[in-house]
Image: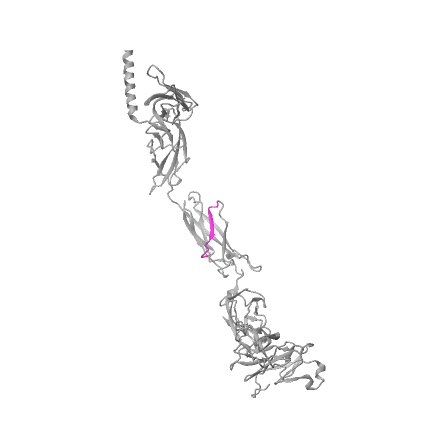
Amino acid sequence: FDDCKGNNKLNFEVSNPDFKVELDGNLVVLKNVSEAGRALFVHARSEHAEDMAEIFILEENEKRGALKEILKLEGNLGIPRQKRAILATPILIPENQRPPFPRLVGKVIRSEGTEGVKFRLSGKGVDQDPKGIFRINEMSGDVSVTRALDREAIANYELEVEVVDMNGKTIDGPVRLDISVIDQNDNRPMFKEGPYVGHVMEGSATGTTVMRMAAFDADDASTDNALLRYNILKQTPTKPSPNMFYIDPEKGDIVTVVSPALLDRETMESPKYELVIEAKDMGGMDVGLTGTATATILIDDKNDHAPEFTKKEFQATVKEGVTGVIVNLTVGDRDDPATGAWRAVYSIINGNPGQSFEIHTNPQTNEGMLSVVKPLDYEISAFHTLLIKVENEDPLIPDIAYGPSSTATVQITVEDVNEGPVFHPNPMAVTKQENIPVGSVVLTVNATDPDTLQHQTIRYSVHKDPAGWLEINPTNGTVGTTAVLDRESPFVHNNVYTALFLAIDSGNPPATGTGTLHITLEDVNDNVPSLYPTLAKVCDDAKDLRVVVLGASDKDLHPNTDPFKFELSKQSGPEKLWRINRLNNTHAQVILLQNLKKANYNIPISVTDSGKPPLTNTTELRLQVCTCKKSKMDCSASDALHISLTLILLSLLSLFCKS
């Protein structure tokens, strides 16, 4: 090969990997070859020109004969003898060829000549999409490409060639024709898997692997066009060393190259490093194409610094009886605030026998929030001293320990306040019978002032008396009645009446305490029983003369309620019209003794409870006798009025006769 300009940057590519071409042009076989008749293609390219050569492999014994016995000349190509009628040797075409097109790339040979026949080419790239890329000279068998090829789009074409007569009838074939696209270095390496973030623990040993960078090259992976080498172009920041990391040029592994002492997160300018990584193809040669990406490396913290209080003693003041946060304890920690190596855990290790104090960590500030959870009493203790310890959520590394600065003292002063009086007991409970006389004493309440050092007096008052039944002596706390206590009142719930009282001291300002009184009311038979229902209807021709089932109820409690006694008042007239039968302790049944005419009747019924003494209540049951036709009941008042007047006349007549 000679480009007439010195063959600068000359490169050979062979279609068969069993062969290679050395720089001096010698074709060298890399392993034993036994297949005769096989063709090779060699693509040569320099800075100024490129060309393709076709080489045929011949049997060893054929080489010893005369040249005319080895080759049959046809045109300018030497073709070995073949048993097949069609010889279609593989074709290699470099991608990205420049015009002009079409360009001759190969030739198909018919051993029996081409007179009276023609070649036909088919397949993907000819008559199948993408169509029209290749074509064949029907008479000569020359194969041409019509435009530049892209190996990354299609690397190989499998075509078929056949010989047909002038009428299109196949004579020979089809025979497979392979076309391979030779890769050109036309794709840059690309980093597709970003963002690239790696972590390494501070103090890690030299040579610790941080992460792996991997680039992709769309060129042929079997060639140097896709042979990548990696390099670090830039490191930010450059302290404490401009070369904190190294990247394996072949694997892309990033490792640490500084001593563990330099990999100290707390002394670094920044715990985050950014590396600009370059990937270059052609094995890293200067002619290679490059691609870059940024790798972010974070130096992770380990717990190598114990938290320390900002001062040895803290002061707090709290009023007695008050709960909540009383002081925030501050600490310093050089570790990473986003980790458990920085987050503080506080504990009270002394001075809290009554568990009146608790301490929790403020998640935003890492401060210790000391709180009173049980109200303090100035009269018991006016001062408290606590010893607080701070640790981290994560354990310290083995060679670090918590020191004296990890404990602090808190001095707490309790301020005296005027506390309200306290009732004893609270709530207060008493049992009384309802209906006791007005002015009766219920009980005497007792309240004391917790401020024993202030010697204050206490006055009492009613705070809440829903029914207005009670009063209290403001000096001695005696509770009496101002009205009758009624267990059946809506202000009584489950036999209990509740009232609230106040105890007020003489402080300035005065303090108040509240006491609750529960009065359980015992029942007295003070409610007559009631009857239900008070209205019943029956047909004038009814066959079932059981008119209605009556029930009785009583607001009182047992034994002042059932069993009830049911009775009919004396019936007027010559004949008895109804009777009443007791069903159980609370129910009875009214039964007609004969069918009645349509009218309204009033039946007086008395009910007596079981109290001592018993109480009786008489109730009139209104009975409507109606006309019933076709399942319809007519209880209109016109007939009822007529019958009622008749009954009145009959009653008057009966009285007249008796007189």
Residue 228: tell me if it is visible.
no
| 423 lies left or right of 104 | left
- Who is closer to the viewer here, 517 or 17? 17
| 653 lies left or right of 531 | left
- Who is closer to the viewer here, 156 or 117? 117
Chain part drawn in magenta: 354-365
Q: State the image coordinates of residue 393 (x, y, percent, origin top left).
A: 52, 55
Q: Which image quadrant for residue 206?
A: bottom right
Q: Which image quadrant for residue 580?
A: top left
Instruction: Judge whether 90 appears above or below 515 on screen.
Output: below
- Who is closer to the viewer here, 15 or 377? 15
Q: Residue at x 49, y 47 (%)?
A: 352
Q: State the image coordinates of residue 358 (x, y, percent, origin top left).
A: 47, 49
- Who is closer to the viewer here, 144 or 227? 144
Quarter occupied by the C terminus: top left
Tell whether position 3 is magenta: no
Q: State the image coordinates of residue 445 (x, y, percent, origin top left).
A: 38, 33
Instruction: Judge whether 491 appears above or below 256 on screen.
Output: above
